Amino acid sequence: MTKPSFAGTLGERLQIPGEALGELKLSVLGNHRALIENHRGLLHCTEDLVAVRGQRLHLHIYGAALRIEAMDGSDLLLSGRLDRAEWEE
Amino acid sequence: MVDIWKEVLGTVEAELCGPEAEALLERCRAAGLQLWKVRPVDKCTLRITLWQRDRTALEQICAAQGFTMKVLNLRGGSRTRAFLRRRKGLLLGLLLALSLLAASSLFVWQLEVIGCDRVSAGRLLRTLAACGVEPGAFRPAIDPELVRSRVLAELPELEWLTVNISGSRATILVREREARPELLSERSPAALYASRAGIVRKVTALSGWSLVEPGDAVLEGDLLIKGEHESLAGSIRQEPALGEVQAETWYEITSVCPLEMLQIREKEGGKGSASLQIGKNRRILWPSSRKGLDECDKIVHEYTLGIDGLFSTPLRLVWAVRHTRTETELFAAREEEMKAALLRGLEERIDGEILDQAFFVGRSEGLLAVTLRARCLENIARAE
């Protein structure tokens, strides 16, 4: 079992939402749209895999016909057929 | 709204070709560029859309990363601005329309009354106009509380009223006062009589003394439950008769109509007239013919400029079309419609249910007669 980060523990104690502390947030609509907030950069971008860097974790989203609908400094809107998501420390 | 903004600021669709597209996107993110519709074409090619103002920054990033950039499409922005610069009249018109729209939203242009039944909408609108709520009224000057107090004082038939103003539309919600029922003394005598001949099936006398029993045959006007009774001491006791008498009744209703009728048809291409209503003033754009209304039907269409439920403007186009009646055609009377109408009429007439029914259809001397015979179970007790 991985040890929670200091920021995570502090946020939990102080009841501060994780996204306010810069944690990666993933919101999924069905299996065709995903919104990734607080990302720190794009690691990989192909039609079947989109990988982004978070504060502590890397997020890998696998699927088909994946497409970045919009992207700015912190948010990324993804569309296509989403199959699964993996987190990597 | 986003699309309008994109038209104003302008967007560029570009194709980028080079190694490690992710690194390029990361540089774009770090530079604060907003990107849309990022899609890889192949392993080395990427298509993206971004603001026109970020084009130079992207070119610099591409040069630093060893990418080639090819602009595929330019939309809005400088093109839109150049288009409007060449058409100053259009730009002026747009600005004028927006200004007029902003100014007109400060006034009420549309009134809607909901809940008026006994009090006529015209009477209510006249009273509201006297209180300052009418088309063209300055919206901030309307005090709904004051309007309510004044209208309720003017129209005692109303129990409650509220004025909701949304944009240029005022919705007046009204609740009418319920008519107070006539109060009868508990000691006043009353009796229940048969409203129709039939055979009594069930008697429920809540007050008074029943004179009939299940199985009795009664005629219309017969006394069913009486309110006066002679007590053992010889005095007359009086109380209002209350109750229900369920009886089997029979109906025979006939409807007759001609087998073939002449129907008036509208002639195509009727002449129309159009007028433009600005606030309370009407300007006739082109007049109608002087033909009298006896020879034609007049159908008026009104189109208000605005979006229903969002905003409305004082401009209203009134289009009146006159259809001349010239041609006629024969059509056959519809038997099924007559049967349905007879059944519907009977259901509305009785205070009970239809047990069984039968229709008889006859045709003679150019007439179609449909007869409904029905057996019903209904409450026949009436005060009069």
Image (cartoon, coloured by chain):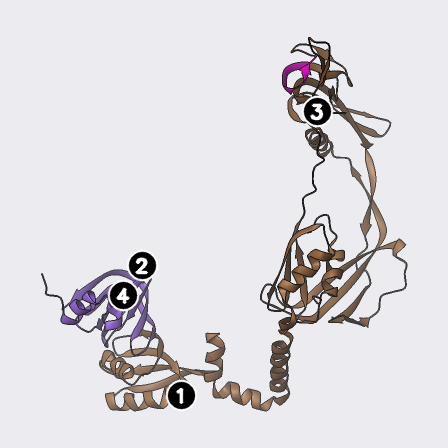
Residue placed under numbered mark 4 in the picture: A26
The one nearer the camera, B334 or B176, is: B176
Q: Nearer the viewer, mark 4 or mark 2?
A: 4
Instruction: Tell me the crowding category of disc 4: few under 14, some 14 to 19, or many 20 or more residues within 10 angstroms, Cα based.
Output: some
For the residues beneath circles 2 and 3, the answer to whether they share a chain is: no
Colour that chain A carries in the picture: purple
Q: Are marks 4 and 3 in contact (CB under 8 Å)?
A: no
Q: Crowding near pointer 2: few (<14 within 10 Å), some, many (20+)?
A: few
Tell me the element at label 2. loop
Extent of the magenta region: B200-213
Residue B93 circle label: none
Q: Which residue is mark 2?
A: A31
Using the image as rendered, state which of residue B138 and residue B366 is in the foreground.
Answer: B138
What's the residue type where badge 2 is placed?
A: Asn
- Residue A7 higher or lower than B339, as above or below: below
Q: CA distance from mark 4 to mark 3?
A: 78 Å
- The mark nearer the N terminus, 4 or 2, is 4
Q: Colour of chain B?
A: brown
Q: Amino acid at mark 1?
A: Arg
Q: Position of residue B101 (x, y in %)?
A: 62, 76
Chain letter of the residue beneath label 2 in the structure image: A
- Judge depth for marks 1 and 3 and give the one in front: 3
Residue hosting label 3: B187
Which residue is identified by label 1? B53
Q: Give the chain of mark 4.
A: A
